[in-house]
Amino acid sequence: MANHKSALKRIRQSEVKTLHNRYYARTMRNAVKKLRGISEKEVAAELLPKVTSLIDRLAQKNVIHKNKAANLKSSLTVHVNKL
């Protein structure tokens, strides 16, 4: 276990941030699943900008890596365009 007060505080902070990041990563995965499950082009095209914006925000806050965000946005755009 940690011996310094600052190390104990860092442990507390990292637990809070882990929960926060886990929540937003799960929210993103659910949004991506929902978009991939849609078969109507109009509905998917309407939802795509919202999901893309969510992915960009998470990449900006380092919840997900920027390359993962780019790959997700690209694959979702290809999916919507194929509908």
Image (spheres, rainbow, N blue to C red):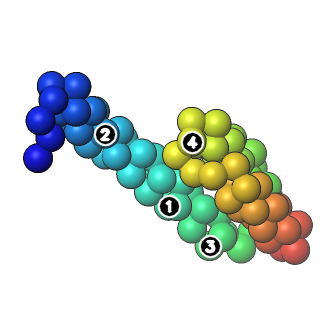
Query: Are the residues tagged 4 and 3 within 8 Å (C-beta)?
Result: no
For mark 3, give the secondary structure. helix
Q: What amino acid is labelled 2 in the image? A: Ser
The alpha-carbon separation of the residues under discs 2 and 3 comes to 34 Å
Residue beneath the point at 63% across and 52% down: 65
The alpha-carbon separation of the residues under discs 1 and 2 comes to 24 Å
Choose the circle earlier in sequence order: 1 or 4.
Answer: 1
Q: Closer to the camera: disc 2 or disc 3?
A: 2
Q: Which residue is mark 4?
A: 62
From this view, report whether residue 74 is shown above or below residue 25.
below
Measuring from the top left, give residue 35's x and y in whole percent. Answer: 64, 63
Kindly indicate the quadrant of the structure image that contains residue 49. Answer: top right
Choose the circle earlier in sequence order: 4 or 2.
Answer: 2
Label drawn at residue 14: 2
Residue beneath the point at 50% across and 61% down: 30
Measuring from the top left, give residue 62's x and y in whole percent. Answer: 57, 42
Q: Is residue 16 shown to the viewer in this render? A: no
Judging depth in this view, the residue of 33 and 18 nearest the camera is 18
For mark 4, give the secondary structure. loop
* Residue sitting at the far right: 81
Judging depth in this view, the residue of 26 and 11 nearest the camera is 11
For mark 2, give the secondary structure. helix
Query: Are the residues tagged 2 and 3 within 8 Å (C-beta)?
Result: no
Choose the circle earlier in sequence order: 4 or 3.
Answer: 3
Q: What amino acid is labelled 3 in the image? A: Gly
The alpha-carbon separation of the residues under discs 4 and 2 comes to 14 Å
Q: Which residue is mark 3?
A: 37
Q: Closer to the camera: disc 4 or disc 3?
A: 4
